[in-house]
Amino acid sequence: MTERMLIGTMINERLYGILLDSFWKILLPGLKVTIPLTVISFSLAMVIAVAMALIQFANVRVLKQLARFYIWVIRGTPLLVQLYVIFFGLPKVGIVLDPFPSAVIVFSLNEGAYGAEIIRAALEAVPKGQMEAGYCVGMSYLQIMRRIVLPQALRTAFPSLSNSLIAMVKDTSLAANITVTEMFMATQRIVARTYEPLALYCEVGLIYLMFSTVLTRLQHIGEKKLSFYVSSK
């Protein structure tokens, strides 16, 4: 074995050892921080989205204008800027938040704006005859929305909302910019210590891909169950 081959073998063994050792050091923050951040933020975002969509659908003038203003601002500004405003900007006015709650607030508000438009479009896709039929049997507006219109709209919006959830998993990497110790932040720290950026960033990319693949599979299962439910009605 030549000296060059020996050096190459040593480098490969070192890189393999780094990747093997770093895998769990990257995955654990993903399970402990990335996934909880995604689940909490997306759950709050869906509450905001449904509320904003219903306000617009009800066409209450003042509330609708406020909802449209919120959606306009959030969708018109970058997510990273929103993170900086909440985490670095609010302390200037005396509001200091920890990194994780700051990320939850920003991701919830951001996704809520996009989700509101998805659900609003789904609500408008429900035939108007459904509302009229509900009134004919003596149901109130809230009963019609809760029992007839909203369930149909959510089934229509499910694929788009699922895609938004998958996108949010990847967007949580931006939380590293406000010192949230999620997967990407953990990877950056390992890179700073080992000087192997290509291999380690590819590794964290594969872990994000793994999470997204699981969610994509769950999305397909959910869509099949909803299709079966609709066809059996």
Image (cartoon, helix red, strand yellow):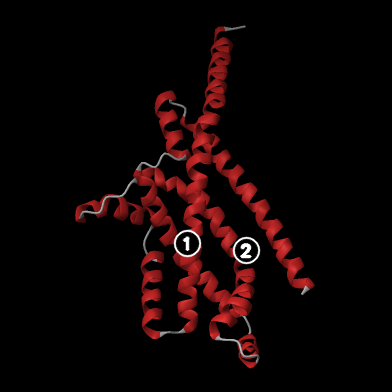
The amino acid sitting under disc 2 is Pro
Asked whether the viewer can see residue 168, the reply is yes
Q: Is residue 233 above or below residue 111?
A: below
Side of 174 relative to 121 (left or right) = left
Residue 217 lies, in percent from the top left, at 68, 51
Please report the residue visible at 63 percent of the width from the left and 79 percent of the height from the top: 148
Q: Quadrant of residue 228?
A: bottom right
Q: CA distance from mark 2 to mark 1?
A: 16 Å
Q: Residue furthest front?
A: 138
Residue 80 lies, in percent from the top left, at 37, 53
Q: Is residue 72 above or below residue 205?
A: below
Residue 159 tag number: 2
Residue 45 tag number: 1
Side of 92 relative to 29 (left or right) = left
Q: Is residue 42 above or below residue 230?
A: above
Residue 58 lies, in percent from the top left, at 48, 83
Please report the residue visible at 64 percent of the width from the left and 53 percent of the height from the top: 216
Q: Secondary structure at mark 1?
A: helix
Side of 168 relative to 176 (left or right) = right
Q: Is residue 6 above or below residue 165?
A: above
Asked whether the viewer can see residue 114, the reply is no
Q: Quadrant of residue 139?
A: bottom right
Q: Residue furthest right?
A: 232
Q: Residue furthest bottom?
A: 136
Q: Earlier in the sequence, mark 2 or mark 1?
A: 1
Q: Secondary structure at mark 2?
A: helix
Please report the residue visible at 53 percent of the width from the left and 70 percent of the height from the top: 118
Pick the residue in front: 61 or 194: 61
Asked if the residue under mark 1 is in contact with the one under mark 2, i.e. CB atoms within 8 Å, the reply is no
The amino acid sitting under disc 1 is Ala
Please report the residue visible at 27 percent of the width from the left and 50 percent of the height from the top: 96
